[in-house]
Amino acid sequence: MRLEPSVLENRFVRLEPMDEAHRQDLRAACDADPQTWTALYPYSMVGRHFDEAWARFYADPAADRLNYAVVVAERCMGVSSYLGIDPANQALEIGGTYYHPKVRGGRVNPSAKRLLMAHAFEAGARRVQFKVDALNARSRAAVLKLGATQEGVLRQDRVTWTGRIRDTVVFSVLAQEWPEVRERLDARLAALT
């Protein structure tokens, strides 16, 4: 498996490797929903927390992380990333996803995830996984709607930045499942205007 950072695009979104040019738009997107950061994310990117998170995740990302700015109408409206990239096992996670509230619940997430999964499987991935906070019903439903299989719950998996202990639900799509998942996603996206 060999992933190269590149621009990924379809008719609804453009995913660009995250860089300094996206920083202020991402800050504005994060500040648009402080409640979500407090309730559901293991770290915060709101207000005074943004610069520290930017430095940790985006300014100099770990070798097993590849971040994408989710661009809608020429503006960064969120982020989604490859995490835990493991070439030896041909596996990775798609996560670290956040969208401005204006673009949630429509075509952006399935479009972005379609691009990311296709890129991963075309690069030789055998397994793509998603990990979601058990309390995040909206994201759990979205991952199932993408066509992923729920595998189980990692109990007391993480301590969030607020001190809450998080259970994490794990989902996956395997390479042999991808053609069917892709076909359903393509049909879903074709029906959107």
Image: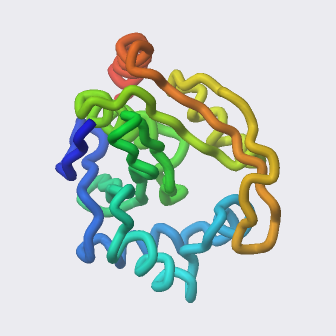
How far across and down, in percent of the image, does residue 100 sit?
A: 49, 59
Q: State the count of labels.
A: 0
Q: Is residue 29 visible?
A: yes
Q: Please state, as top left, top right, bottom left or bottom right, where the N terminus lies in the image.
A: top left
How far across and down, in percent of the image, does residue 144 sit?
A: 60, 27
Q: Residue at x 21, y 52 (%)?
A: 5
Q: Is residue 14 left or right of residue 70?
A: left
Q: Residue at x 35, y 78 (%)?
A: 24
Q: How is the image coloured?
A: rainbow
User: Residue reaching furthest bottom?
Assistant: 48
Q: Quadrant of residue 189?
A: top left
Q: Quadrant of residue 149?
A: top right
Q: Nearer the viewer, residue 33 or 175?
A: 175
Q: Nearer the viewer, residue 151 or 39?
A: 151
Q: Residue at x 35, y 39 (%)?
A: 88
Q: Is residue 152 left or right of residue 91?
A: right
Q: Is residue 111 visible?
A: no
Q: Nearer the viewer, residue 190 or 2?
A: 2
How far across and down, in percent of the image, does residue 59 sit?
A: 33, 76
Q: Residue at x 33, y 56 (%)?
A: 66
Q: Please state, as top left, top right, bottom left or bottom right, where the C terminus lies in the image.
A: top left
Q: Nearer the viewer, residue 176 or 134?
A: 176
